[in-house]
Amino acid sequence: MSKNHERIHIDEKNLCHLCVTELESIYAELDLTEAELEILSAPRQTITVHFPVKFNGTTRMFVGHRVKFNDARGPSKGGIRFHPDLQVDHVSDLAFLMALKCAVVDIPFGGAKGGVVVNPKELNAGQLELVTRAYIRAIGDFIGPFKDIPAPDVYTDESVMVWILDEYENMKRKHVPAVVTGKPLELGGIKARQYSTSLGGIYVLEKAMEKLRIGIPGTRVAVQGFGNVGENAASILHERGYRVIAASDSRGGIINQDGLDVPELIKHKKDRGALQGFAGARSISNDELLLCDCDVLVPAALSDQLDSDNAGKVKAKIILELANAPTKPEADTLFVDRSIMLIPDVLANAGGVVGSYFEWIQNINNDYWEPDRVLERLKNVMTDAFDAVYALCEQEKSVMRKAAYKIAIRRILYAEKLRGNL
Ligand code: NAD
């Protein structure tokens, strides 16, 4: 439970506010009918469970939720989080965003989200295991490889996924590895899941660079955030010949216009617990990182980083949103005016759920692919999604975020229509 604990600080409060603001205008442009709007407005299933867990002879009641927003395109997919402030409305918004994300990259999943109202910092591993198992017993009839497939999210990790798997299999009295993704390799996980969000984003970035006729060698990248997504992104970019010039974490950032030696930087962070103090690099604040002289800016930490105050001063030509909702709507407009290409989160960070999709396929078929096949398929899915979004942008002279949402909504509604629901 080590690294993911940091994620509890990630502020997603505005994530859905942003999405809803965008959606209002998109719904109007798509000229949706009343019935279509209604289908997109309410989750198909919202479950709230109250369950007892006994710690050393004392019983505590816990509350858990699981929301399946839309599953017209396939079984619903989405993380399970442990958080003391978890609220069912926010879970529902996040489930909707998962439905959109899966539809943007055209994988056959709907969207879900769930979690337990708990502060994992107050429990030891044994107690967390009891809570996880009790939650799964409570929602066990509603999940399954062809119903709804959980995954890690804020404050949950591989160990939690194993407890979910084991509890579910105990209930069903058989092996069902495809009930959950984000498992360890030994229990049917896939290696690429660790870095598929970052690599998927980089595949999409490279398509964008092709459009703008920017080559890889020497392209200067600044990465905000050095957790799972940011560190993997920096590492992959470095390996592919980009010049990663700046990086930051919650303690601050560093910059060196000649490029950072990313493998050495990762070692430095491991030894010192921070990026600052890295040989040859100058310390900068997170605000400075966003505005530094670079070609590509990769927000990979928090929401609401780019707003009307700083968007006019961003120097990058491309922004790759690996974090969820790093850009406020007013900044979006400023980037359009300044011809900065912004690759939106719903496309840029969808590689994670694509990796989960591959894990699920392999579990279902009990057939495990060579790593090269995983990477090739990830590339195909991500670049096809980019092509579709870019083509619509060109056709409608719109921005990528709007185009991505439009494609997702049309796909979901078309699936509903095929099913006879519209
Ligand atoms: P993480 O907890 O592993 O890392 C977060 C990083 O952000 C840490 O390095 C932390 O130090 C840094 N950070 C915190 N405050 C900061 C600040 N003020 N300035 C700069 N850095 C700061 O989380 P993660 O899994 O890497 O997720 C990062 C973002 O990507 C989140 O928005 C998450 O929702 C999104 N995302 C993650 C995945 C995934 O597969 N992990 C998939 C899709 C989207």
Image (cartoon, helix red, strand yellow):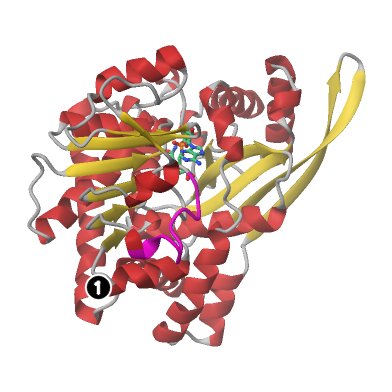
Res 7 quadrant in image: top right
The secondary structure that most of the magenta stretch takes on is loop
Say whether residue 420 is visible.
Answer: no
Q: Which residue is mark 1?
A: 393
Secondary structure beneath label 1: helix
Res 276 quadrant in image: top left
The residue located at (70%, 25%) in the rendering is 121
Say whether residue 175 is visible.
Answer: yes
Q: Position of residue 230 (x, y in %)?
A: 37, 36
User: Quick one: 414 or 419, which is closer to the camera?
Assistant: 414
Locate residue 338 relative to residue 56 in the image: left or right. Answer: left
User: Quick one: 287 or 177, which is closer to the camera?
Assistant: 287
The residue located at (36%, 49%) in the rendering is 290
> The magenta stretch spans which residues?
302-312
Q: Amino acid at mark 1?
A: Cys
Locate the N terminus and report the quarter of the image it occupies.
top right
Instruction: Say above or below: 334 vs 122.
Output: below
The residue located at (43%, 78%) in the rendering is 26
Q: Position of residue 176 (x, y in %)?
A: 51, 29
Instruction: Say above or below: 133 vs 376.
Output: above
